[in-house]
Image (cartoon, grey):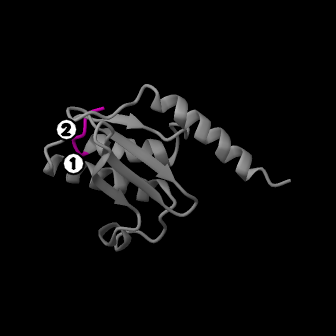
Amino acid sequence: MFKRPERNKARQKRHLRVRKHAVGTEERPRLNVFRSLNHIYAQIIVDTTGNTIVAASTLDPEIRAEISNGGNKEAARKVGQMIARRALAKGIKKVVFDRGGYRYHGRVAALAEGARESGLDF
């Protein structure tokens, strides 16, 4: 039987539980991760104003030129490195990590490690 919608509902419930505690402020915005089967997306968001400051994904032309598949750990690491470079250029050094209800494993962990390697602190 096809269980995907039930899994996504459970993930969304976990994400809401995490969001009660992970709030992005001006001093420490939130690094949000969304994962699909073929791509991974990251945004740095200030929740008090509702603004997205920086975004990166495997659909960006700079990353797309380097990778063949957007749904693997190497692509996620490159997205993490890119979001960290863009955040540091905007003067953001510390963030709150929001894993989006996903397990801290695989592509989500690779994105976080890439961001840490490039200088983000969380």
Q: Nearer the viewer, residue 109 or 89?
A: 89
**What residue would you read off at disc 2?**
93
Mark 2 burial class by Cα count in 10 Å: few <14, some 14-19, many 20+: some
Hey, which quadrant is residue 59 in on the image?
bottom left
Seen at 58% across and 34% down, the residue is 14
Q: At which x and y percent is residue 7?
A: 69, 45
Q: Which residues are magenta?
A: 118-122
Seen at 54% across and 29% down, the residue is 17
Q: Nearer the viewer, residue 3 or 67?
A: 3
* Magenta stretch encompasses residue 21: no
Above or below, 17 relative to 115: above
Mark 2: amino acid: Lys
Q: At which x and y percent is residue 92?
A: 18, 41
Mark 1 burial class by Cα count in 10 Å: few <14, some 14-19, many 20+: many
Q: At which x and y percent is residue 40?
A: 46, 56
Q: Nearer the viewer, residue 93 or 9?
A: 9
